[in-house]
Image: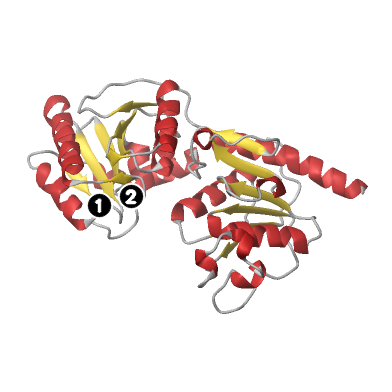
C-alpha cells in the first residue's frame, strides 16, 4: 500500500468506544499515529443536531475550551457529536483539511471529502466508500500478541474452543430473558454435542440479570467467563477460538469476528431493524456468518478487510486533494 503523504492527522471521537476504535483502526491502516481529540459537548449542544451548533469549535468541550490551530491536514471522525466540529475545522482551515467521516454523518454529507459507510445504510455519492461492516483495528499482529497473552488462561478449556461475544439491549434489540435462555441452551448444546469449550465475555449492555442467567444456564459445561477484572480478553478470545458466537446487536463485534476468517455464528436477540437485517444478510450472503442454532461446523471465507480497502481509497483521494491544493 502506498503511504499516506501526511502524518498531521487528528481523530475526533465521542464517548462511544466503537466510534473511537473504528477511527483508530483506520489511522493504523493508514500508517499514522493521530492526535486524538475526545469531544464531550455539554448541554444543549449534546442534544442538538449539528446544524444548530453556532460555535462548534467551542461547543466541543463543556468547559468552554476549544479546538485550536494549527489545523491538521486530515481529520478522521465518527459519531454525531463530531460532525459540527469536523466541518468547523474545515471552514477554519479555509478548506485545507481533508475530512473523513466514518459512518453516515446524516447531515451535510456533501461537505465531507470521504464518508466510509456500511452498505446497509444505503448511502451513495461520489464521496462515499461503501463497506460490508464496521471498520476494525484488528490486525494479525494484534491477534498474535493477544493470543500469546491469554493462551495460559484458556489452556484448560477443551477444543474446539468457541469464543462467545455477548452484547445486549440497545435502541433496536432487546436481550430478554427468553433470548438469554435460548443463547444458554445453544451453548449447552455446543458443549454436550461437540465437546466444545466456551470462552465468554459480556458487555455493560448485557446486564447483571442476563449475565447471571447465562452463568446458570451453563452448568455442567466447560466454560470461562470474564469477570471484568484485569486485561480485556476480547482480542485473545478471537485469536484463540476455533469459531465465534456473537449476538446480533453489535455491528462492530460481528465485523471484528468476521475479520478473523473463522466461522462466525450470529445469535439472534428480540427486535432488530431494516438496517441490521441488511447488514446480517450481506455477511450471510458472503458466506461469513450463519445463524446460531446450537450446531457447530467449519467453513472458510475471505476475511472481512474493509479497513484496508478504505485506507487505500483515503490515501488515493487525499493525494489527489493535496495535489489540487498545491496547484491552486
Residue at x 61%, y 56% (from the top left corner): 83
Separation (CA) of disc 1 from disc 2: 8 Å
Say if 310 sits above or below 284 in the image: below
Mark linked to residue 70:
none
Residue placed most toward the observer, 162 or 210: 210
Mark linked to residue 233:
2
Query: Is the C-beta separation of discs 1 and 2 under 8 Å?
Result: yes
Say if 183 sits above or below 49 in the image: above
Residue, far right: 328
Q: Quadrant of the N terminus?
A: top right
Question: How is the model colour-coded?
Answer: secondary structure
Q: Where is residue 99 drawn, in percent x and y?
A: 69, 51
Residue at x 58%, y 34% (from the top left corner): 130
Residue that badge 1 annotates: 226
Q: Where is residue 277 drawn, in percent x and y?
A: 39, 32
N-terminal label among 1 and 2: 1
Residue at x 26%, y 35% (from the top left corner): 162
Q: Is residue 148 visible?
A: no
Res. 323 image quadrant: top right
Q: Is residue 127 left or right of residue 136?
A: right
Q: Where is residue 110 drawn, in percent x and y?
A: 70, 45
Q: Is residue 225 visible?
A: yes
Q: Where is residue 25 drawn, in percent x and y?
A: 54, 47
Say if 283 sits above or below 76 in the image: above
Res. 62 image quadrant: bottom right
Amino acid at each position: 500500500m502506498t503511504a499516506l503523504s501526511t502524518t498531521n492527522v487528528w481523530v475526533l471521537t465521542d464517548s462511544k468506544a466503537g466510534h473511537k476504535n473504528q477511527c483508530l483502526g483506520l489511522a493504523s491502516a493508514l500508517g499514522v499515529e493521530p492526535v486524538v481529540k475526545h469531544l464531550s459537548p455539554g448541554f444543549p449542544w449534546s442534544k442538538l443536531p449539528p446544524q444548530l451548533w453556532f460555535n462548534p469549535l467551542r461547543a466541543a468541550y463543556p468547559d468552554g475550551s476549544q479546538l485550536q490551530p494549527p489545523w491538521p491536514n486530515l481529520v478522521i471522525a465518527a459519531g454525531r457529536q463530531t460532525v459540527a466540529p469536523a466541518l468547523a475545522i474545515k471552514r477554519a482551515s479555509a478548506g485545507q483539511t481533508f475530512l473523513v467521516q466514518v459512518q453516515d454523518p446524516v447531515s451535510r454529507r456533501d461537505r465531507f471529502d470521504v464518508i466510509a459507510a456500511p452498505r446497509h445504510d444505503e448511502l451513495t455519492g461520489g464521496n462515499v466508500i461503501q463497506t460490508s461492516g464496521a471498520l476494525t483495528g484488528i490486525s494479525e499482529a494484534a491477534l498474535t500478541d493477544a493470543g500469546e497473552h491469554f493462551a495460559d488462561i484458556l489452556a484448560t478449556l477443551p477444543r474446539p474452543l468457541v469464543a462467545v461475544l455477548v452484547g445486549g439491549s440497545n435502541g433496536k434489540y432487546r436481550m430478554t430473558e427468553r433470548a438469554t435462555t435460548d443463547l444458554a441452551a445453544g451453548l449447552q448444546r455446543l458443549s454436550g454435542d461437540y465437546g466444545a469449550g466456551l470462552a465468554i465475555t459480556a458487555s455493560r449492555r448485557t446486564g447483571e440479570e442476563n449475565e447471571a442467567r447465562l452463568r446458570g444456564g451453563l452448568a455442567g459445561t466447560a466454560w470461562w467467563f470474564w469477570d471484568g477484572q484485569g486485561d480485556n480478553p476480547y482480542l485473545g478470545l478471537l485469536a484463540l477460538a476455533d469459531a465465534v458466537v456473537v449476538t446480533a446487536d453489535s455491528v462492530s463485534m460481528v465485523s471484528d469476528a468476521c475479520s478473523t476468517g473463522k466461522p462466525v455464528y450470529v445469535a439472534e436477540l428480540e427486535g432488530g431493524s431494516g438496517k441490521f437485517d441488511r447488514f446480517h444478510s450481506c455477511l450471510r450472503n458472503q458466506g461469513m456468518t450463519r445463524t446460531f442454532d446450537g450446531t457447530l461446523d467449519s467453513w472458510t471465507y475471505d476475511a472481512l478487510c474493509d479497513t484496508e480497502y478504505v485506507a487505500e481509497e483515503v490515501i488515493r483521494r487525499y493525494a489527489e486533494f493535496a495535489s489540487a491544493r498545491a496547484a491552486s
